[in-house]
Image (cartoon, rainbow, N blue to C red):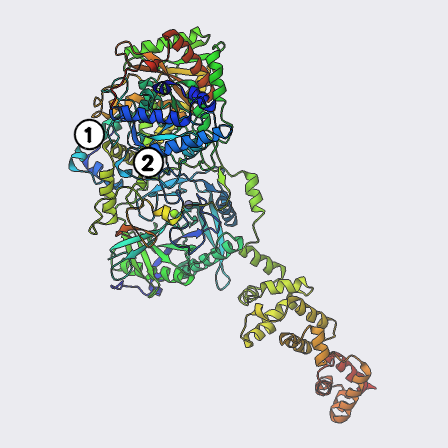
Amino acid sequence: MTELIRLTAAELAEKIHAREVSSTEVTQAHLDRIGEVDPRVHAFLHVDAGTALAAAGAVDAGLAAGDAPASALAGVPLALKDVLATSDAPTTCGSRTLEGWVPPYDATVTRRLREAGVPILGKTNMDEFAMGSSTENSAYGPTRNPWDPTRIPGGSGGGSSASLAAFEAPLAIGTDTGGSIRQPGAVTGTVGVKPTYGGVSRYGLVAFSSSLDQAGPCARTVLDAALLHEVIAGHDPLDSTSIDAPVPPVVAAAREGAHGDLKGLRVGVVKEFAGTGYQAGVLRSFETAVDQLRALGAEVVEVSCPNFLYALPAYYLIAPSECSSNLARFDAMRYGLRVADDGAHSAEEVMQLSREQGFGAEVKRRVMLGTYALSSGYYDAYYGSAQKVRTLVTRDFEAAFASVDVLVSPTTPTTAFEIGERTDDPMAMYLADLCTIPSNLAGNAAMSVPSGLSDEDNLPVGLQIMAPALADDRLYRVGAAYETARDDAAGGPLVHQVPELEVAR
Amino acid sequence: MTRTAELMDYAEVIERFDPVMGLEVHVELNTNTKMFCGCPTTFGGEPNTQVCPTCLGMPGSLPVVNGKGVESAIRIGLALNCRIAEWCRFARKNYFYPDQPKNFQTSQYDEPIAFEGYLDVTLDDGEIVRVEIERAHMEEDTGKSLHMGGATGRIHGADYSLLDYNRAGVPLIEIVTKPITGAGERAPEVARAYVSALRDLLRALDVSDVRMDQGSLRCDANLSLMAKDATEFGTRTETKNVNSLRSVERAVRYEMCRHGAVLASGGTITQETRHFQEADGTTSPGRTKETAEDYRYFPEPDLVPIAPGRDWVEQLRGTLPEMPAERRKRIQDEWSLTDEELRDLFNAGAVELVEATVLAGATAAEARSWWVNFLAQEANSRDTELTALAITAAQVATVIGLVNAKELTNKLAREVVRGVLDGEGEPAQVIEKRGLKVVSDDSALIAAVDEALAAQPDVAEKIRGGKVQAAGAIVGAVMKSTNGQADAKRVRELIVERVGA
Amino acid sequence: MPNISRNEVEHLAKLARLAVTEDELDTFAVQLDQILDAVAKVGEVAEADIPPTSHAVPLTNVFREDVVRPGLSRQQALSGAPAAEDGRFRVPRILGEE
Ligand SMILES: [Mg+2]
Ligand SMILES: [Zn+2]
């Protein structure tokens, strides 16, 4: 049974739909694996075997009755980031303030997964309200990197990425506000995609920074990510910022990429994302990846995007500003943690005390930073200027995409760092998102695909591919071509090199 | 409320100061659903039964703009002679309060959908005052709190509160005037007339129930006084909770007298929110703004900008009904009325009836005379409304037609109308039943004239002698003998004829 | 440019409804100062003639039909409430104005 958990989602779907194996067996295999390794990894905040098996059973029953599968992924189980509303399971966002809160509604992504016959194994751990790059900011304790349990699995979606690398789930959902899908993907040797902003509905995604948040697929292969992308993407009238256009043909692009070459493709290497602050092994892995793209027939040129260097400071103004407003609703009045309601304290005092107790340090820091940046007298210098940088970053992308089809860079400057290493130094922590943030500001599509191990520490490195808005399919074509070439050269998928985890019995 | 404020005599206030007003009116739209979600807006539902994740501000929920709300906002803007933004956004107004589920209000800030307009307001004596409109913008209403425990049921002294979010998210249009200066003594009257005119206009647009008693139209009145020699506005207070037209007038007047007393005694006005007390017509201080509120406005990232195309705006302009003020002007011009006549016409509530009577063939003067004079008196003596009288505009037009055709005298016509009002049927049936035809047969009249002349030979002699004015007595006698059914003019002609013969 | 004082941090905490501790005030004052110092860099390139971008995708006029959509039952609405009474959310006494 254990070999089931090593299969890709595409392989599992094929076997389930051919009735070689049941969704129930596949789901149970993953639940078993979670039982074995999650005490060590802590990828999950909540596992609901009953709901997952019921969904799997429904798929099996449908297939047995001769029904066509509800989707290409029907029956393949998935791990859902705990920032997406589920009407049958707590949605905590990794925060004490929402401990035990069960939303009375499903997120659109959740609904689409259910309609596609995808059993949801449970909710994955994350930095509180998606604020962080290491999953250390979860109120429920950190998630560990399956490559090295003393290291972080990336963040904020460290639970989702770790669940894939630990073979607890073949698929996961993440959300990416400044890199929270791609950076965890990079440091766990998995694939993560931030679709074009507006490509996947945000309805039911608990907002961190509304103008940047985007849910997307996490998987172990580019094709699996594409299959999941097609299930969750598409217009949603409940999200005003949802794009009312057909989903780019991502699955076709992934299949084409895996079989084709990259002749005629122009690839731009972002000049600014190299140099000091970048781990040498990361840069070497990146250069090897660029050589591989060249070998596949792509024309590689260097491109300058000077304003990308201002993306990180702009992000650390825009995201905190929006979050200071988005998180104001956690006031202990209608839901969530309430403390000091003893008849003596006023509503205002109860709000203050509850928020103080319900939020962790990083959340408070960002809420205060955002409150400051939006204050009259500071707005123009901070929030206003950050929005102008956003324009400049978008212009850099436009200029670059006028001459190249995709841009590439390392996903993150370093490999996974030690748990605790950066917790007292917010600025050092923020650097983890240096390369991923520009695409959040501009809203275009970006992917991280494993580019091997950094030679000095044997930890995974990610190659970031960036495409214009609505050209998500380009990511999959390039990503799949690169993945195939890399795996062929390395003798197999990177993720299969994850060390065996200690198994709890 | 317990401590009565010092008040200055109103005449003295006017003598020493110029009042400056600013009126902010919040109008709840009568859309089927809320501004940003599909919950119903009906008034008076069971608590928390008209709610969803969005209007409860639940984590993960998102707003979507109600297109009808935008349409109503644009129509209101056009009716207020405003410019309509080519491009505008919603913003978040951040402040914590338990009736505000997200702890921010989704509102418009520096980019209102409508701006720079005006409303012409007619005062009781027919004077027209132009009130400049600064802006009309879209926003959402809050929930309602019920304060429990304590003695008063009021917020002060309450033990806890209960919240109902049915009203949270109901579409509001906030209409803000520019400072209204120069109204002087008439400031309270202008304030009232403005809110009244705005209410009529919103009703004509059919965008709101405009029920001040139910809170679907709410007015906040800002007031400050300027000393006669001052060049800058004084410190203002903002009076809330003004729930009727009469209260608008009283609140402004009260604040004028209160400000006057404070300023005259060398004090300063505190910039604050005040609450109007309906019971005694006073205002009491609410929250003092120690530090200016910092609402940390920023563009609402969950909603995309609104860019009303000019074709859409023009199409909406085409849907505007005739505005109350325009209508007054048109009627005055078309019917050549003096200001007083116009005022009487409107005060009698006879405009629609006169219009309908004109449409049925009468002239405006005739129709107006009937409705504003005779029929208004009838309504009065029958203790009913003009519109409730049992006669149609068409019937009145028929009677007027009969008078013009000389088939009825004015006196007879009045009797016909009374018959209709008494339920005796159509004018023709009343004429038939009551035998009210004008006697136009000369032979019958000649006999009556001859008889009257014979009965008063001395008068006949005078007329014969050239004193034609003496004929009045004979006319009277003839009218009497014919029960008033004779045409007096014809009778006079016949008298002269018969005397001369 | 920034040099955020402990008092300012206290004011921010009040605006943000956070009953921060004395220790937190000290830590946050230092950290916010560092962060603000770093992010103030945006001022270097934010020229006056550059239009701000508030939204990642250039959409406009996204409207909903004015048609009632099923919402939550009262029970669902109140399901996560820390306290409820008579179908309403029960909250501690509210200070200040209505
Ligand atoms: Mg307002
Ligand atoms: Zn609602």
Q: Is residue A199 visible?
A: no
Q: Estimate how packed mark 1 is, as few (under 14), some (14 to 19) or many (20 or more) residues with alpha carbons within 10 Å.
A: some
Q: In which quadrant is the C terminus of chain B drawn?
A: bottom right
Nearer to the camera, A191 or B301? A191
Disc 1 chain ID: C
* A290 over A368 or under it: above or below: above
Within 10 angstroms of label 2, few (less than 14), some, or many (20 or more) residues? many
Check whether the beta carbons of the residues at disc 1 and disc 2 lie within 8 A of each other. Answer: no
**Secondary-structure class at tag 2:** loop
> Tag 1: residue type?
Val
Q: Is residue A57 visible?
A: yes
Q: Which mark is residue C30?
A: 1
Q: Position of residue A13 (x, y in %)?
A: 44, 23
The residue lying toward the viewer, choosing from A475 and B440, is A475
Q: Quadrant of residue B250?
A: bottom left
* Relative to A106, A420 lies left or right: left
The answer for how far apart the CA atoms under marks 1 and 2 are is 33 Å
Give the number of marks. 2
Q: Is residue B497 above or below residue A378?
A: below
The amino acid type of the residue labelled 2 equals Thr
Where is residue A348 drawn, in percent x and y? Answer: 25, 47
Residue B116 position within the rendered picture, expressed as x and y whole percent measured from the top left: 47, 45
**Which mark is on residue A91?**
2
Label 1 within 8 A of ligand 1 by Cβ:
no
Q: Is residue C42 left or right of residue B176?
A: left
Q: Nearer the viewer, mark 1 or mark 2?
A: 2
Q: Is residue B282 left or right of residue A71?
A: left
